[in-house]
Image (cartoon, grey):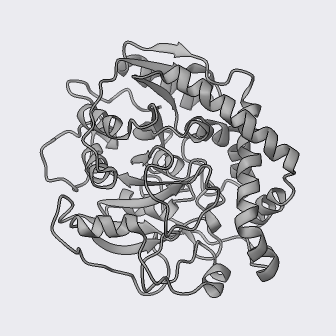
Amino acid sequence: MTASPGSAATTAWVPGRRLRRGPEAPGPLSGHRFAVKDLVDVAGAVTTAGNPDWARTHPVARTTAPVVRRLLRSGATLVGKTVCDELAFSLEGRNLHYGTPLNPRAPDCLPGGSSSGSASAVARGEVDFALGTDTGGSVRVPASYCGIFGFRPTHGRIPMRGVVPLAPEYDTLGWFARDAATLARVGSVLLGSSEDRLVKSIGVARDAFDLLPTAEHRLLTSVIDRRFRPHRSVRIFAGGRRLWLDAYRFRQGRSAWARHGPWIERTHPRFAPEIAERFAAASHVTPKEAEWADRTAATLARSVHRLLGEDRLLLVPAAPTAALPLRAPAEVGGSLARRLALPLGAIAGHSGCPELVVPVGTCAGRPIGLGLVAPRGWDVPLLRWAEGRFRPRGYGRPAGTSWEGSRGLWSPPGRGSDEASA
């Protein structure tokens, strides 16, 4: 069943009484406030997964997801659960039931999804960091749209217990922050590793940037050419991006329907039209298509691993456009996701590699970010590299305070950021 179009921009928070949990012990995150996407269980609360029929048909969580417990035991304070796109099956950030969270950096634009409320709360300064999930780009796209830092870890690195799944082949639990130092500090708690490696070279996926509109292409390539020297251009979409899209779409669809199809057929939930269409398409993925997708995804993963080697970073667009206007029809966002955002997201998705999003500028006032993909297992080195390179002006302020560079942009030591706009 589909429902009518949703509301205009609104709060990041799930409706009703705000859920709060105090820290369970002092630790490295003492004094930090955080939020969790409403796919993540917290004992005593119903996880809505962005849909009231899901909330109606599922019980109150009896246990708290391990990832949340680790943060509470490290001194952080949980101050609420955030709105997300329905069952995380979208990249736009719209929710017709609970409203579309505000994009604080561009109030006339979508926040990006599906971790829309978490990105909004961080960008607005309501929390120091927030948890999201990322399957095809659900941390990376909102980070880009809202002009903040975001991180998708190596697939399987952080336990997904207590998290509503979409496609476990790709599901990860990531997070947002306004500054790279806080992003790394959260990582040190969740990843529990002190590993360190050196970045020896940087590759630029030029064919991925060639997918962007003119203004976004000009901005991102200018930033790369000025600030990521030396680098080498590489081609990522050998064989065409359609391979990346279809392999992802078939694998994700098979998995999403296997997990949620029985509930959908039993409950007949009210979905936004675009969400209903995606589940309908997922229900028609054939075994032959899924088998082809598994083989193809494995081949594409190996191609990414070869490009990265042991010590290279790969620069990619974090999203196919700057933040989309609120007035953009849902079908436009859906079309962009299918044609462009999903292949871009599948670079880290198929390979299982970590990706960090850095906010680099705006196009006509609409934020856009740059994605940094690292080899599998390079989570901590990537976070530390970003922390050292993307320091805010006035570095040395207490951790967890708002990150601000020129026009809200990052500025590596000794360099201005005036050119990072278009």
Q: How many marks?
A: 0
- Between residues 18 and 288, which one lies in front from this camera angle? 288
Q: Which of the 4 quarters of the picture holds residue 391?
A: top left
In the displayed structure image, the side of residue 266 where residue 403 appears, left or right: left
- Between residues 301 and 210, which one lies in front from this camera angle? 301
Residue drawn 18% across and 65% down? 31
Q: Quadrant of the N terminus?
A: bottom right
Place of residue 350 in the rendered image (x, y in percent of width and height, measured from the top left):
62, 38
- Between residues 411 and 41, which one lies in front from this camera angle? 41
Place of residue 59 in the rendered image (x, y in percent of width and height, measured from the top left):
57, 87
Q: Which of the 4 quarters of the picture holds residue 383?
A: top left
Place of residue 287 in the rendered image (x, y in percent of width and height, measured from the top left):
85, 50
The answer, for residue 35, to whether it is visible in the render is: no
In the displayed structure image, the side of residue 133 where residue 197 appears, left or right: left
In the displayed structure image, the side of residue 46 where residue 248 appears, left or right: right
Residue 343, relative to residue 128: is it above or below?
above
Place of residue 137 in the rendered image (x, y in percent of width and height, measured from the top left):
57, 48
The answer, for residue 382, to whether it is visible in the render is: yes
Residue drawn 42% across and 52% down? 105
Residue drawn 63% across and 87% down? 56
- Between residues 94 and 365, which one lies in front from this camera angle? 94
Residue 246, relative to residue 24: is it above or below?
above
Residue 274, relative to residue 320: is it above or below?
below
